[in-house]
Image (cartoon, coloured by chain):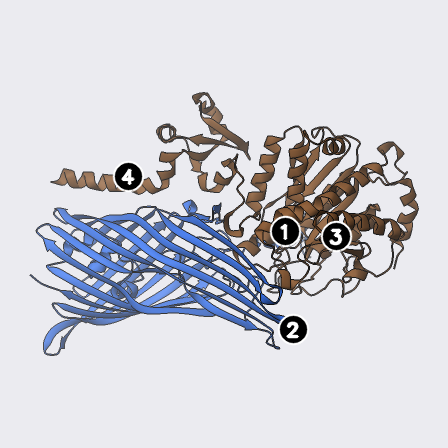
Amino acid sequence: MRRPFALVLVFAVAWGFFPAFAKAAENGEIVSIDKREFIARHLEKKGLDLLMEKNGRVYIVASPGELASLFAARVRFSLETNRLYPFVRTGISPAGGLNGAYHSSLELETDLRILERDHPELAKVVEMGESLEKRKIYALKISGSVSLEENEPAVLFLGCHHAREWISVEIPYLFGKYLLDHYDGSPEVRDLLDHCQVWIVPLVNPDGLEYTIHVYRYWRKNRRMNGDGSYGVDINRNYGYRWGYDNIGSSPLPASELYRGQASFSEPETDAVRRLFFSRNFGAMISFHSFSQTIMYPWGYVNAPTPDESELNAVARTMSELISAVRGTVYAYGRAAGILYTTNGDTADWTYGVAGIPSFTIELPPVDVEHGGFFNDEAAIDAIFSENLPAMIYLTDYAVRHFVPAGRRPAGREGRLRPPDRIKFYGKIDKSP
Amino acid sequence: MEKPLPRFLLPVAVSAFCLCFFLPASAQLVLGQYEDEAPLRSWNSFGIPSAAAVGLGGLSFARAQESTTSLTNPALLASLSGYSATLSGAYSAASLFKYSLVNTGVVVTRGNLVAGTYGLDSGSLSFRLGSWAFAAATGLLESYGRPGIRAEDSSQTYSLDMHQSGYLRIFHAAAARRVAAGLSAGLGVNYVSGRLSRSVLEEYSYLTGPITIADDKEEKYRGLFLNGGISWELAGRLTAALVFRSPYIKKAEAQSALRYQAPAGGTDIEINAEARNEYRQPWIFGAGGCYRLSAAWTLNADLAFFGWSRYRARFFDEPLARPFRDVLKAGVGVEYLANTRIFGHSGLVPLRFGVAYDPQPMDSPRSTYLSIGAGTGFRLPSLALDLSGSIGRENGSGNSLMAGQVVLTFTYISNR
């Protein structure tokens, strides 16, 4: 009688393992093994399905039989399936889940990797930096020959500085996808990408976005613990041009929605954008936000014209007309501080202020709170993208047409390129009130 | 003449000073006791402690007081005589600081908030058949309730309501057998089911009309796992026990609905999602001892290992960041039995005192509850009524959280 009972007990203990390996029985588990051990034991010769190698660990897909072999060989491994499963669901768009058709941080990373995988000649995912909660901030570089560092203009499209503005992730992401999907079929897109680099950062604020998905939909800032019980820095008030110019366009109070941080570029998110910006010859920039259907150009910190007011206004007007031509949606346009409110330490003031490039903030639909505020119907994503597409292509083309090659850089401004007629403005801009 | 300080001290001091500024950066993640799926009071739940167990430090692996012990160590059933029935009621409370949108950036409180639950905690039956013993039990294993929040602005043009409630109930069946003199083994099968619902409702009053934003999430849990153990009576005075709970996946059918309504603009936007969430619960292993110092005095000591580093949570198709570590929970208790006469019958009055050390699994900040428990009651040959309470204070999070419970257990044991 003792033996059957012992067998039951052994079975029971073994059965305890079962749930953890249930998935292995179906598809195989993702496991990671220390690279040194992997090599030392010549596991690479066993035909294991190698996924990737990262931080000194080798990631493989192991069938139940292979897992048993690893056990038998006393190889120490970690189950990674839960952590990494979304990354290997390649071939399908993982958008979905808690925030519907909008991307989460992980979904976006997966989709950017898919674009890179599907268009290896044209697209490259670049890790720009890391957020406070250790999420990666990604840029997608798109160019006719993406692996080459060519002396060509670059255009920057940024999304989701503000966590709750979910639509602002989708528009730059879809623009990248559109360019890649149409490179072969559209002479216009091919010509554009053969002459420039398009840099897309759909999600500047991944921590904030995750907080809006999991905890509170209307969160705006990043997730900085300010030390006084409040959280978050408004990272679109944390850039270095006229940072903290007054307490109206940003706030020194940590609890404020407009808190600008303790110093300019104090946040890893803005620092990542800064490092990317100074590493390339950006000729134009759009930072997407929502809501109000508005195209704004500098200055934001003060209601005064830049020396390029007329040119910036003309570009904004053209973009507005292009948007309106798609399905009649009206985007107002004008100087930021005049058309909306003053903002200091924002992206467009900074990129224009330090580099003199055409810089715009586009507030996407809806037009007001009664039509959704920071909400957009999932079905509206494609329509909003479609109406913004001509404007984005126009601005990219504008940057190509106004590009100044590296050989003609003005002395003393190495690393920055701008049309010669802009140089005279730069000094004036720096001395603005 | 004063001896000059060693030259290396200055750079060391400067480095240490600088480190003080850099170290807090690692604590950006708001992980804590009270993630949405965290049980109220402690992550380390193993079985449902009866009043006797609570009075002895919370764990009771080696001592059979009643059939509820089957939830942790079914082997102890073999030491119960005849048949028994146990019913427990409990009031449990815990203070919380950071949870959901409270004190994580949206709603700020002046201090900790308290959540409490009360009700029938557990019920169990057991009976002996020769060398075999069997038991069935049910009870409230975990509670996910949180203090509700309602916030308004002074002009009453904006309000926010947040609620979370939930529970996990256990259904347990077990068999045990005395396999040798003084040696018993037991095995239990456990099915858990429950739910968790969380809602956040915001209402704005604009001149043109109201705007509401509603965020509702609902999960329905189920899971199946085993528990088992052996107990061994050594030298008449000492009983030792080993126990385990198998890892299992707490599965959840989950739904989410996010809705924005602005009737004035004819706007009604909904984002709905469904998913099968998974929470991989880790192994638990435990060891316990019960030493009878004399007819009146008994000493209990228990240790439980929770393999939280293997905990994984998958929520709406994405893994949740839960950098957990394995922890050891410990409890020590002493019981004194006083002879007395109750209603003309001779009986016993137990006096119990225990302490528990209950570290929580979060890597950062480290957080540990230190609890004391005390209890009493009376025991007649067939009936027992026990009342115990415990109170614990948390260290590590900086919020001085408290957790406590009061448990009343009624037990009938036949002597046939």
Q: Which residue in the structure is indicated by mark 2? A: B207
Q: Residues within 10 Å of mark 1 (few under 14, many from 20)?
A: many
Q: Residues within 10 Å of mark 4 (few under 14, many from 20)?
A: few
Which one is closest to the eye, mark 4 or mark 3? 3
Query: Circle 1 marks a residue in which chain?
Result: A
Q: Which chain is blue?
A: B
Q: Are marks 2 and 3 in contact (CB under 8 Å)?
A: no
Q: Position of residue B377 (x, y in %)?
A: 22, 72
Query: Circle 4 marks a residue in which chain?
Result: A
Please tell me which residue lies in front, A277 or A197.
A197
Q: CA distance from mark 1 to mark 3?
A: 14 Å
Which one is closest to the eye, mark 4 or mark 1? 1
Q: Which residue in the structure is indicated by mark 1? A: A167
Q: CA distance from mark 4 to mark 1?
A: 49 Å
Q: Position of residue B204 (x, y in %)?
A: 59, 69
Please tell me which residue lies in front, A328 or B111.
A328
* Left or right: residue A17 compared with residue B134: right
Please tell me which residue lies in front, B62 or A117.
A117
Outermost residue, left side: B416
Q: Which chain is brown?
A: A
Which one is closest to the eye, mark 1 or mark 2? 2
Q: Which residue in the structure is indicated by mark 3? A: A361
Q: Earlier in the sequence, mark 4 or mark 3?
A: 4
* Left or right: residue B117 compared with residue B17: left
Q: Which mark is residue A14?
A: 4
Q: In this view of the protein, can residue A60 be seen by the observer?
A: yes
Query: Circle 3 marks a residue in which chain?
Result: A
- Mark 1 is on which residue type? Ile
